[in-house]
């Protein structure tokens, strides 16, 4: 399948279910009724922070498992703090909304939650202070964001990752995702699956919407957070899993050329899950197959999120 075809399938897979139930303006209502005025501050200036959480349906258990629900919502709250927002709901209240949405939508398939806090005032002026904040959340069906059954083809982007002192990369802020969109479109339109950003110093940062890991000589390596990366929940999970499996982990600067000589390379995130990379800038990674450390971490991750690994049940909210 071509990269363009894969994007088309993704768009169809992520189509919005307008009859699903969402949470907006303090009420549960059909998503089709959840609208904002065109003069809304967040629409004008990108003043919104958001999160993304997955729910995995296990048919044998008859249960939906939301992965690291509290961790995601705590990060959303921290993003709001960076952007001078006052979350209308507490973390506990947002957790209750997510659980209620899963129940009201009778979710019996894999789903994706999109919670967000946004500047909802109807006014001009690109500022953060003294502007009303609101909270909303909706869900959509979602299986694979990237095709994880094959190795991805990626390319280093001509677009640089925004610097922490331009738009804070620790805040999952909607306005900053213009940067991601530019890189993603460039990559896909050039026949690749995904882009890899370099930071403003020229070191490897992350994908357009994923964190990045590579393996060299048995060591799992990932760019540290000072490389303008999002402090990803899946990134944290992979690091914790690796250490639990006695796999050495290094968080450090990564040079572009290290991607070309890596033994293994993969992207990870709530959407991407664990997606291995077969080729970067037309250079085959390792032997062109999924490496053993990637295989182990990916298998562990998928067993955990589906509720079949009792060792990490504390990361799941079962419904």
Image: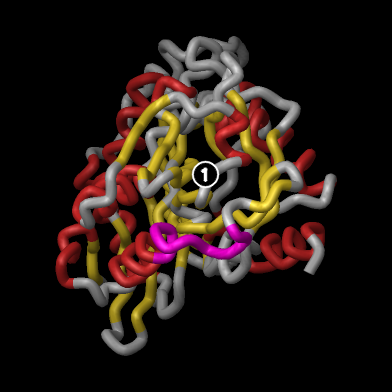
Residue 55 appears left or right of 33: left
> Magenta segment: does it hold 200?
no
Total numbered circles: 1
In which quadrant is the C terminus drawn?
bottom left
Label 1 crowding class (10 Å Cα cut-off): few <14, some 14-19, many 20+? many
Magenta highlight range: 287-295
Residue 181: image location, x then y, percent:
69, 37
- Of all residues, the one furthest to the right in this rendering is 190
Residue 78: image location, x then y, percent:
31, 28
Q: Nearer the viewer, residue 229 or 291?
A: 291
Inspect this view and state whether residue 85 appears.
Answer: yes
In which quadrant is the N terminus drawn?
bottom right
Residue 173 appears left or right of 18: left
> Magenta segment: does it hold 289?
yes
Asked which secondary structure carries label 1, the reply is loop
Residue 205: image location, x then y, percent:
53, 30
């Amino acid at each position: 399948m071509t990269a363009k075809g894969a994007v088309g399938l993704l768009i169809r897979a992520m189509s919005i279910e307008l009859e699903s139930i969402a949470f907006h303006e303090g009420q549960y209502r059909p998503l089709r009724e959840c609208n904002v005025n065109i003069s809304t501050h967040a629409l004008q200036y990108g003043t919104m922070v958001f999160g993304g959480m997955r729910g995995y349906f296990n048919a044998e258990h008859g249960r939906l498992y939301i992965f690291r629900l509290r961790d995601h919502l705590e990060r959303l709250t921290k993003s709001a703090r960076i952007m001078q927002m006052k979350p209308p709901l507490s973390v506990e209240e947002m957790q209750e909304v997510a659980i209620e949405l899963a129940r009201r939508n009778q979710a019996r398939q894999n789903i994706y939650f999109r919670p967000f806090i946004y500047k909802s005032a109807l006014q001009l002026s690109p500022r953060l202070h003294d502007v009303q904040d609101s909270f909303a959340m909706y869900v959509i069906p979602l299986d694979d964001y990237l095709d994880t059954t094959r190795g991805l083809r990626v390319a280093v982007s001509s677009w640089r990752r925004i610097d922490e002192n331009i738009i804070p990369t620790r805040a999952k802020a909607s306005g900053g995702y213009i940067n991601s969109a530019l890189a993603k479109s460039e990559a896909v339109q050039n026949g690749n699956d995904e882009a890899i950003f370099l930071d403003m110093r020229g070191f490897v940062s992350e994908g357009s919407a994923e964190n990045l890991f590579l393996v060299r000589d048995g060591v799992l390596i990932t760019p540290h957070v000072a490389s303008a990366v999002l402090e990803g929940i899946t990134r944290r999970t992979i690091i914790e899993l690796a250490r639990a499996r006695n796999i050495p982990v290094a968080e450090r600067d990564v040079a572009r050329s290290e991607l070309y000589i890596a033994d293994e390379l993969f992207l990870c995130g709530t959407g991407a899950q664990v997606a291995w990379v077969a080729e970067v800038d037309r250079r085959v990674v390792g032997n062109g197959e999924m490496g053993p450390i990637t295989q182990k971490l990916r298998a562990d991750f998928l067993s955990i999120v589906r509720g079949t690994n009792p060792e990490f049940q504390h990361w799941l909210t079962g419904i």
